[in-house]
Image: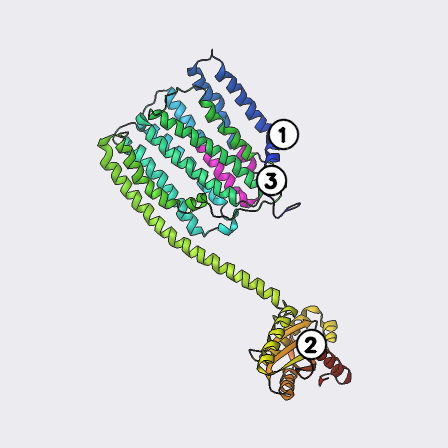
């Protein structure tokens, strides 16, 4: 991207994030309107003359519902301004906040009209869990784009999403459906149900932490930072409510200043949506192994272990009805087995993904190495590989008392082909010439393209000059046959110069220079001939 810096220091990344926070809070009208609304709510909560009952309705009708609606409108606004590849993320975020809005409306209506039917309680819980599922799917949309080195196969991601959904709905059945089927309002004892929300909140924190640390786009890293702060506020709120219902901490009625903690999460979500389309410097992704990523990678195992652990703790502390214990233990067993199967399958898929990624990495490194040492057109060795192989061959021949020949070859008539038929056909001719020359050589010999229509051949371990001349004649004969390319019959010849080690020179540089000079002599005296200085 324009103005990108490939590797920002930690200080630079903090400065970029700080500037984005300042821009978002100071200039964005939606964020400022949200903050103004929250300031009004803060003043009302602090006024001693305002009753808590009135504040409870005020919080739901005047603050909660409008702010959730503002989140939805913001997502819709963003949905119409993003590229096609990002639309899935914002669509799922819109669906998540819409479930949240319906759940809040249903809860307020049932409370105001004193509708205490068990079905309404279960519906609220279902909508709240679906909220988390849509958020999970939204983050799944980003996995292939953020932290690409850690991207996994679609099957691996599908298994993780399925496991997360199974855990959430399994806990929902455990806390809500089983007591509901027995005619018991699951919200009579809300503390265990709130533990489900705490677990899901922590899951979002882990997921967002992983996405944030792997994001290479600073704008998306800023979005994840806002959403991460929002998820952290949910953890604190749901954990506080669970502790209050369990009577671990003193109870606080709705309409108290504690509600401000709930309201504080809204500007964080709105700021994430309203991050401006600035051109950010590119942030280097963090590739270090961390406990957070390790936990995220094995979260199916964590979920499977959580089911029996939560069940044991809740019944040891007598927080749940003992009459429903057999049904709940059946639920725990079913979902434990299902999650265990998914965990084992996921582990195998993950192993296959790792092997695939390692194979791709090895293939990429080999391709880079090949490109660095070979001519991109003909595939023959380039100057660097030729120099390395020639030095090694000289050292071996010097130790064993063997001879070595360097052949410098140049095509006669190639310029006319290039001028007549163009570069495209001439390049194809060079590639065909290289293939024919390579077929005449041994595995220990080296063919290199020196540049243009010139080739260099290193013949290692020959007995005499006659052996070198014999190979040179084979090269001339192979190239001398007619080439048929795109219906055109092309004929070229080859002039070759020979230099021998140790007779003509003892260094790689002098051997190549002598062979080059011999080739030019042959080309000047009789094109298509073989010469040795």
Q: Would you name the residue on which mark 1 appears?
A: 27
The residue under label 3 is 11
- Give left or right: position of 157 versus 145: left
Residue at horizontal 40%, vertical 54%? 349
| Magenta-drawn stretch, dominant element (helix, strand or loop) | helix
Question: How far is the residue under mark 3 from the one under mark 1?
Answer: 24 Å
Residue 81: assigned label: none
Residue under the image location 43 percent in, 30 percent down: 236
Residue 246 visible somewhere in the drawing: yes
* Position in image of residue 129 (x %, y %): 39, 35
The reply to whether the magenta stretch includes residue 339 is no
Q: Please tell me whether mark 1 sits on a helix, a strand or a loop.
A: helix
Image quarter for residue 182?
Answer: top left
What residue does disc 2 label?
A: 512
The image position of residue 400, as x and y in percent, is 57, 82
Q: Residue furthest front?
A: 399
Magenta region: which residues?
74-99
């Amino acid at each position: 991207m324009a103005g990108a810096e490939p590797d920002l220091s930690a200080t630079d990344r903090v400065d970029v994030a700080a500037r984005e926070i300042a821009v978002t809070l100071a200039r964005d009208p939606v964020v400022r309107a949200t903050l103004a609304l929250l300031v009004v709510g803060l003043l009302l909560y602090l006024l001693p003359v305002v009753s808590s009952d009135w504040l409870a309705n005020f919080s739901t009708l005047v603050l909660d519902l409008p702010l959730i609606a503002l989140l939805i409108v913001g997502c819709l606004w963003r949905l119409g301004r993003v590229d096609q590849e990002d639309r899935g993320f914002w669509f799922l975020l819109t669906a998540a906040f819409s479930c949240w809005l319906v759940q809040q409306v249903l809860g307020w209506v049932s409370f105001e009209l004193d509708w205490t039917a068990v079905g309404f309680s279960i519906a609220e819980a279902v909508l709240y869990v679906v909220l988390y599922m849509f958020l999970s799917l939204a983050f799944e949309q980003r996995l292939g784009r953020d932290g690409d080195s850690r991207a996994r196969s679609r099957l691996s991601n599908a298994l993780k999403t399925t496991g997360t959904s199974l855990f959430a709905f399994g806990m929902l059945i455990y806390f809500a459906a089983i007591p509901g089927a027995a005619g018991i309002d699951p919200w009579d004892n809300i503390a265990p149900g709130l533990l489900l929300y705490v677990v899901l909140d922590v899951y979002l924190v882990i997921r967002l932490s992983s996405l944030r640390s792997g994001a290479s786009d600073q704008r998306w890293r800023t979005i994840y930072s806002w959403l991460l702060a929002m998820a952290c506020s949910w953890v604190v709120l749901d954990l506080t409510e669970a502790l209050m219902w369990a009577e671990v901490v003193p109870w606080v009625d709705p309409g108290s200043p504690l509600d401000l903690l709930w309201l504080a999460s809204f500007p964080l979500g709105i700021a994430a949506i309203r991050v401006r389309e600035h051109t950010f410097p590119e942030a280097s992704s963090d590739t270090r192994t961390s406990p957070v990523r390790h936990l995220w990678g094995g979260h199916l195992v964590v979920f499977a272990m959580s089911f029996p652990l939560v069940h044991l703790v809740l019944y040891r502390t007598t927080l749940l009805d003992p009459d429903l214990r057999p049904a709940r233990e059946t639920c725990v067993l079913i979902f434990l087995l299902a999650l265990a199967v998914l965990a084992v399958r996921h582990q195998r898929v993950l192993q296959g993904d790792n092997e695939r990624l390692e194979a791709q990495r090895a293939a990429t490194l080999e391709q880079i190495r090949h490109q660095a040492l070979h001519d991109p057109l003909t595939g023959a060795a380039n100057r660097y590989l030729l120099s390395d192989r020639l030095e090694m061959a000289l050292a071996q021949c010097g130790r064993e008392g063997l001879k070595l020949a360097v052949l410098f070859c140049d095509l006669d008539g190639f310029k006319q082909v290039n001028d007549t038929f163009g570069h495209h056909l001439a390049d194809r001719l060079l590639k065909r010439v290289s293939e024919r020359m390579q077929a005449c050589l041994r595995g220990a010999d080296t063919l290199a393209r020196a540049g243009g229509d010139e080739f260099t051949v290193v013949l290692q371990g020959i007995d005499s000059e006659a052996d070198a001349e014999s190979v040179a004649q084979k090269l001339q004969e192979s190239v001398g046959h007619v080439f048929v390319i795109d219906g055109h019959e092309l004929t070229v010849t080859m002039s070759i110069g020979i230099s021998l080690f140790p007779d003509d020179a003892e260094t790689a540089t002098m051997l190549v220079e002598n062979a080059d000079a011999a080739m030019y002599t042959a080309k000047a005296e009789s094109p298509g001939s073989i010469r040795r200085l």
